Each structure stands twice: as C-alpha cells, then as structure tokens.
Image (cartoon, rainbow, N blue to C red):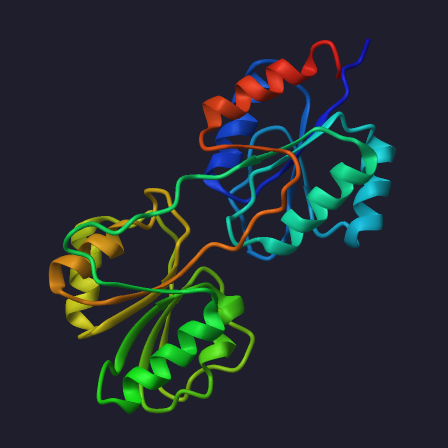
Amino acid sequence: MVERPILLLGGTGEARSLAAQLDQAGLPVISSLAGRVRNPRLPVGEVRIGGFGGVDGLVRWIRVHDAAAVVDATHPFATTMTAHAATVAERMSLPLLRVRRPAWTPGPRDTWVPVPDTAAAAEHLAQRIAGGGSSRVFLTTGRQDVSVFADISDAWFLIRVVDPPTSDLPPHHEVLRSRGPYDLASERALLRSHRIDLLVTKNSGGDLTRAKLTAAAEAGIPVVMVQRPVEPAVGDTVASVEAAVEWVTRQRRPNF
C-alpha cells in the first residue's frame, strides 16, 4: 500500500531539515517552494516550485496528489501562503501543522522600536529623520518590501537582499546581494564600514541572521523591529523540527 504524501510548504532552513528527516524516516514528502528566490537551496526528495493559483489551486493540487497533511514551514512573514494553507486545511478537514522558529526577544543591551508592519517602519523612520535622527540605514526586510521606503530621500540605505529588488528604491542606496548565515565579526565590520546608525529588520527569529542584532546592540545602534503577523487559529504549531517529525509520525497512524 502506497502511503499518501505530506505537502511541505518550505523555503526555510527548518523546512529543508524537516524534509531530510522525513525522507530518512521513509515518509513520502513533497516540498513546495514559492519560486521567488533564484537558485534556491533545494531540500532532499521531491520538489515543486511555483504558486498553486490561490486557495482553489491548492485544493486541486492536494486532491490530485492525495496529500495526507500540510506542514507549513514557510517564513514567519509568508502571510499569504500561511492563510491559504489554513483555509484549505479547514475546508478539506486536513491536518495542518505550522513550524515556527521562536521569535527574537530583546536583551538588556538592545534598543528596539517595535512596529506592526513595514509601512509603520517607514513612517517611524521618516519621523526620526525629520527630528534630526538616523540617516544611514541598514535595511534587511527583504526585496519585496523595499518599495515602502522609496519616498524617503533624506537617508542613505544599505539594502541587503538575496536577489535584486525589482520595485522602486530610495534615491540614496546601495544594494548588497548576500545570503546568510552571517557571523558576528562580519556584521560588526559591515555596520562600521558603512557607518550605519539604524537597523530596520523583521522579527524572523532563528540563528542564521541573528548576528546583526548582536552587532547593533554592541554598537549602540537602535533597531526598528517589524513584529510578526498574527497566525490563523487553525491547525497546530510547533517550534522545532524535532517536534514536527513527532507530529507527522503521530498523524500518519492510523489516520494517514
């Protein structure tokens, strides 16, 4: 009897690790990547790349492939895919798990300004500049959010992205194409060499990009921190790959 596959919505380090562990355990898994990053790091096993075509497209895909469950291990800010997965799981009475790395929390040396979204981050930055504040900004919110800052003309931006932005950019900027992980020594040198006086980032969590926060705290650089969006109240959530493997193992017998 052929086991029904698990649809793993990926694109993160956790997703790649989970795909490897499930494959090693002999559990059929199909990883799905959004296709927004050129030359993505591929997980082991079967992989599909590209969108599903909204909720209806995801429903059709699950029916065609007879997926037994959906594991959402996307980025914490992949709100559209997460919402679609929750809607489909509820509609189809399908088991759903979200794998979410713990969010970062500020330490005693951190100076964080929490904001609800990137639009609020841009508004805070504009107000800060108008008050004579920061003017050299390290922006690490991802290429899809850069356009939100395009109208800020009184600051210089170091924009770190994996792939080049395709939207409007601030008038004064430098694009730094780079892929993590990042070590502390390099992040210290980056902040110093570019004379950064403000960091704008998202609360992605995890260790791959945490070094920039430590370097900022050491240098007394404030951080505008975009908070995570609220998750749908559907399905289960775990904070580690190990817990996700246990969840899948429990679900597959006898229900899968």
Assign the C terminus to one quadrant of the image.
top right
> What residue sits 17% from the left and 58% below the top?
217
Q: Residue 104 placed where, x, y %?
A: 33, 47
Residue 202 position (above or below residue 168): above
Residue found 47% across the figure and 81% down from its top: 169
Q: Residue at x 30, y 48 (%)?
A: 105
Identify the residue at image location x=48%, y=35%.
14
In the rendered image, residue 23, in percent from the top left (x then y), is placed at 59, 20
The foreground one among 253 and 44 is: 253
Image: 106 above or below 86: below
Q: From what the image shows, is residue 53 above or below residue 73?
A: below
Q: Position of residue 138 (x, y in %)?
A: 30, 70
Asked where in the image residue 171 lies, by quadrant, the reply is bottom left
Quarter the N terminus occupies: top right
Instruction: Answer left or right for 131 relative to 232.
Output: left
Residue 162 is left or right of residue 132, and the answer is right
Q: Quadrant of residue 186?
A: bottom left
For residue 13, side relative to residue 28 (left or right): left
Q: Look at the picture and state if 72 lies above or below 56.
A: above
Q: Position of residue 124 (x, y in %)?
A: 36, 78
Q: Count every numbered label the image shows and give the total.
A: 0
In this view, which residue lies farthest toward the front?
Answer: 233
Image-based side of 136 in relation to 66, left or right: left
